[in-house]
Image (spheres, rainbow, N blue to C red):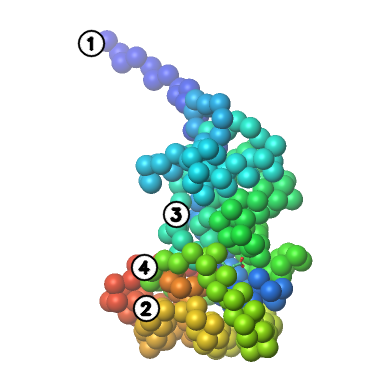
């Protein structure tokens, strides 16, 4: 019997993966479009992008799970976003592939995560934050018209942050970690349409709508004082009040209200829609005990909603 041939070392190096986070807005969506602060936490994994081998000329982005390849000339939003991103970064050729770990259109920042991961892939790393953010903003504008910037900033920076449009993001210190349970309503609405519906309310009922947006800003300010103290009870109260104000702006749905009520009934400290609303996801803040997290998850699952637990660490 002859000895087996020695194993030759593999010459295949897997392509480098460029990553970006999703996000959950804890407080302040929509008001943030009008210059008020928002409080958001990054969620990982968000998405990953890499360069396809062999590289092909031109620009493309393949999402295998969707069985689709997007190109600038195919008139899809993703194709146009890729073109806007590549133009901002001065790149003409790149064949990218990506995988999303978040539901699309659910308010968890999947499009921004994809934009930031693509920007990082086109730049070859995550060192150049300014160009990454500029490219991802061009990408986001294709989807959302006039985004505040909270989604792609969280996607690039991670962490728990207070964000103000035009000013950027500052880290919010957490005294201890917190557990969020996120549930998908299964409903979908376009962010662009939901932002436009608030703009219509600002135009038609300026005084009332602006008061509502200012009330939301006050909740964010209170929460930013409570979090460094580890005061999750106050954060939960602010989330519940924020949900009422978002409902008053016609951004909630019956399904989202049902999910929020179920989460609170099972012991969540607070629950609200997250992101643009009109569907998408809700987020529930759970107290420390694992038993409550399990009860909240079970209550949401019993209503047929896919859930995920997110640990937000200091
Ligand atoms: C979407 O995730 C958050 C909104 O406030 C829009 C924005 O900030 O651009 C609804």
The nearer-to-camera label among 4 and 3 is 4
Circle 1 packing at 10 Å, graded few (<14), some (14-19), many (20+), is few
Where does label 2 land, which residue? 255
Q: Is residue 84 above or below residue 267?
A: above
Q: Secondary structure at mark 1?
A: loop
Q: Secondary structure at mark 2?
A: helix
Along the polypeptide, which appears first: circle 2 or circle 1? 1
Where does label 4 land, which residue? 186
Q: Are marks 2 and 4 in contact (CB under 8 Å)?
A: yes
- List x then y, in percent, for residue 114: 54, 50
The nearer-to-camera label among 1 and 3 is 3
Q: Nearer the viewer, residue 167 or 187?
A: 187
Q: Tell me the CA gap for discs 1 and 3.
A: 49 Å
Q: Is residue 216 visible?
A: no
- Residue at screen point 66% across, 35% down: 91
- List x then y, in percent, for residue 77: 52, 49
Along the polypeptide, which appears first: circle 2 or circle 4? 4
Where does label 3 land, which residue? 101
Where does label 1 land, which residue? 1
Q: Are marks 1 and 3 in contact (CB under 8 Å)?
A: no
Q: Is residue 253 visible?
A: yes
The nearer-to-camera label among 2 and 3 is 2
Q: Tell me the CA gap for discs 2 and 4.
A: 9 Å
Q: Tell me the CA gap for discs 4 and 3.
A: 16 Å
Along the polypeptide, which appears first: circle 4 or circle 1? 1
Q: Secondary structure at mark 4?
A: loop
Q: Quadrant of residue 94?
A: top right
- List x then y, in percent, for residue 268: 44, 84
């Amino acid at each position: 019997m002859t000895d087996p041939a020695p194993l030759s070392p593999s010459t295949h190096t897997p392509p480098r993966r460029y990553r970006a986070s999703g996000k959950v807005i804890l407080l302040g969506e929509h008001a943030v479009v009008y210059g008020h602060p928002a409080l958001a936490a990054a969620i990982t994994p968000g998405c990953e992008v890499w360069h396809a081998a062999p590289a092909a000329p031109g620009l493309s982005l393949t999402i295998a799970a969707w069985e689709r390849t997007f190109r600038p000339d195919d008139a899809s939003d993703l194709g146009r976003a890729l073109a806007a991103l590549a133009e901002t970064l001065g790149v003409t050729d790149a064949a990218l592939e990506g995988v999303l770990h978040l539901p699309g259109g659910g308010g968890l920042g999947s499009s921004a995560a994809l934009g930031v991961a693509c920007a990082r892939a086109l730049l070859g790393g995550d060192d150049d934050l300014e160009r990454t953010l500029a490219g991802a903003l061009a990408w986001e504008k294709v989807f959302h018209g006039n985004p505040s910037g909270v989604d792609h900033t969280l996607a690039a920076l991670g962490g728990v942050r207070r964000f103000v449009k035009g000013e950027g993001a500052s880290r919010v210190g957490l005294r201890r970690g917190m557990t969020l349970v996120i549930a998908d309503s299964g409903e979908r609405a376009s962010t662009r349409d939901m932002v436009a519906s608030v703009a219509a309310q600002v135009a038609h009922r300026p005084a009332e709508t602006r008061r509502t947006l200012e009330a939301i800003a006050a909740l964010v300010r209170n929460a930013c004082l409570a979090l460094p103290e580890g005061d999750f009870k106050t954060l939960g109260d602010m989330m519940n009040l924020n949900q009422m104000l978002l409902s008053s702006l016609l951004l909630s749905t019956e399904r989202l209200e049902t999910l929020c009520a179920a989460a609170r009934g099972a012991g969540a400290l607070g629950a609200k829609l997250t992101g643009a609303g009109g569907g998408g996801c809700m987020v529930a803040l759970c107290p420390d005990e694992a038993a409550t997290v399990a009860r909240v998850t079970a209550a949401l699952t019993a209503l047929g909603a896919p859930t995920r637990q997110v640990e937000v660490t200091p």
